[in-house]
Structures are given as structure tokens and as C-alpha cells.
Amino acid sequence: MDSLGALPVFIQVAETRSFTAAGRHLGISASAVGKAIARLEDRLGARLFHRSTRTITLTHEGRLFLARCHRILGEVEAAKQELADTHAKPSGRLRVSLPMVGMLLMPAVNAFIQTYPEIEPDLDFTDRLVDVIGEGFDVVIRSGDVADSRLMTRVVGMFHHLLVASPAYLDRRGTPTKPADLAQHACLRHRYPTTGKLEAWPLRQPQHVSGAIEPPATVVASAIEPLISMAEAGLGIVSLPDFALREHLKSGRLTQVLSDCTEHSGVFRLLWPSSDYLPSKLRVFVEFMAKNLFSS
């Protein structure tokens, strides 16, 4: 422990290249600084500084030891902060990036805000691939795979794409029984706002049929909520994730079609910068979302 206490002294000397300046910063005499360094070198069995009447410079061993000292004291500070967090309420601003379907995830976000009133969420809605670290986000919610080794990840739920329409539309236009039937139907398509491309429908052809099916784009929208509204109004068939349709299917406002001809599954993930220390505001957000995002 005495050696650990000498580390801040060593770091100050290494940074200031002066026993006097290091002592002034630490509130001790230059003589006390010199004695602390001498004792540390004696315990380590290595010389840490080249000393002359005018200059103090690090030896090769000193440079190696300095790099380790920064990491050691960083770990100590992180441990102290972690212990402090266990006795304090999670608080502070939390920057969160959500996809444009984020409004459909808002029940869980609203519940989080009510549960942790001391935390101040700063919510950014976008479908573009944000730079989590470069743009200063604490955490993002995204679907799909992740290939960034700088990020930690946790899967918080799976979803499937379904084809649905209102009972009134199906009564009027008939119910499709195979993917090819969609050519005769009004299809409500989603366009990715970031790329301008139409989202593909997860259609599986019968084994004896070859070729991909491209449903007509009767109506196109860049957000999910208008597509749901149009489907409820009986304007056509739409392909959307099941978590966005749960209440509509339960109430009978929308009905699934071509259930045997669709295949798609995906995951939602939480992503945050990799670190040995997880701030309490981020820790409780990750745990809360993992438990509640798709629980209803």
C-alpha cells in the first residue's frame, strides 16, 4: 500500500520533470518527493529517472512503469466511482439513439423515465448508422448485426416481419393465398429514409416456384406509423415487424395474411462504448430495457 501511495508522486515527477514542481502540486517538500522516489526505486529494484543538476528524465524502465501507473490509478478511480454509484441514485443526462420506429418502443422508454426520474434522457431518432463513440452517445438501440469491437452489445428482443391487412380490405379485395397474388393487391411499402430504397418483403416462394416476388408499391412511406394507419383504414397490405402490430392484431383491427409464406427474424440490440466501468445511469438503462422492451 505504501508503494501504491508513491505512484501519484512518481507520476507528478514524470510529468513535471521536477521534484520541486511535483512537491508544489502535491503539497509536500521537494525533499519528501526525492525520498519517496528513492524508496520506490529501491522496492522495484530499478532506476526510474536519470538525474542531473539541471534535468530529470525517465529511464526506459521509468517509461514502462509510467504507462502501467496510469492504468493502475485509472482502475482505482473507476473502482472508487463504482462504489460511490452503489450508494447514489442513478442520475444525469443519458444520450440515447433510437431507430425511426422508436415511437413504437416508447412505452418501455416512458416507463424507464418514470422509474428513474433523476436520469435525463436525450433521445435522438434516426435510421442512419451513428458513430456511438464519435458522436458522444451513451447507448443506442438498433436492429441487425454489429461489427465494432469498441462496443459492448446486449440483445434485448427478437422480432418477425408479418404481412397484415384490415378485415374490411380483405372482404373487399379477397385474401391472398400465395405470394404471386400480391400483384393484384394494393401494397403499402416502406422506404428507408437514409438510402431511399424500398424495404424488401420477407416472402418465401413454394418449392416448385422460382424467382423473387416484388410486390407493387401502391403507396410508399418513409415511416412505419403512417403505414399502420393506412392499413387500418383498409388501403392495402403492409409488411411490418410484429412488435409494431401486437395491439392491432389482438384487437382484430388488422389480420395476418400469407403466414406460411413469410420468413424473417431479427434482433434489437443495445450498444454502448466498451469500458471497464459502467456508469450507474447506463447500467440501469441496459437492465431495464432488457427486461421491459418487448415484455408486453
Image: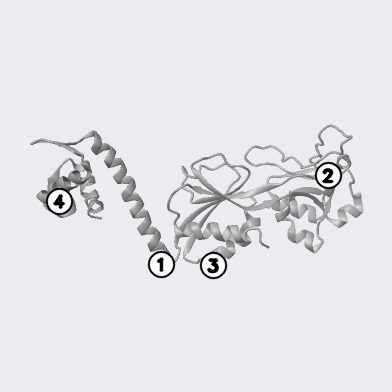
* Mark 4 residue crowding within 10 angstroms, few (<14) / some (14–19) / many (20+): some
Query: Disc 2 marks which amino acid?
Result: Cys
The image quadrant that residue 103 belongs to is bottom right
Separation (CA) of disc 1 from disc 4: 34 Å
Q: Which sits earlier in the primary sequence, circle 2 or circle 1?
A: 1
Separation (CA) of disc 4 from disc 2: 76 Å
Q: Residue furthest left?
A: 53
Separation (CA) of disc 3 from disc 2: 41 Å
Residue 267 locus on image (x, y percent): 65, 48
Q: Which sits earlier in the primary sequence, circle 4 or circle 2?
A: 4
Query: Disc 4 marks which amino acid?
Result: Arg
Separation (CA) of disc 2 from disc 1: 53 Å
* Mark 1 residue crowding within 10 angstroms, few (<14) / some (14–19) / many (20+): few
Q: Is residue 142 above or below residue 62?
A: below
Closer to viewer: mark 1 or mark 4: 1
Q: Residue at x 82, y 51 (%)?
A: 235
- Left/right of residue 119 with respect to residue 218 in the rendered view: left
Q: Which sits earlier in the primary sequence, circle 1 or circle 4?
A: 4
Element on which disc 1 rests: loop
Query: Disc 1 marks which amino acid?
Result: His
In this rendered view, identify the residue nearer to me: 96 or 218: 96
Per the image, the residue denoted by label 4 is 24
Residue 253 locus on image (x, y percent): 81, 60
Per the image, the residue denoted by label 2 is 261
Element on which disc 3 rests: helix
Residue 132 locus on image (x, y percent): 50, 45
Per the image, the residue denoted by label 1 is 87
Q: Residue at x 84, y 47 (%)?
A: 260
* Mark 2 residue crowding within 10 angstroms, few (<14) / some (14–19) / many (20+): some
Q: Are the residues at dot 1 and dot 4 in contact (C-beta closer than 8 Å)? A: no
In this rendered view, identify the residue nearer to me: 278 or 68: 68
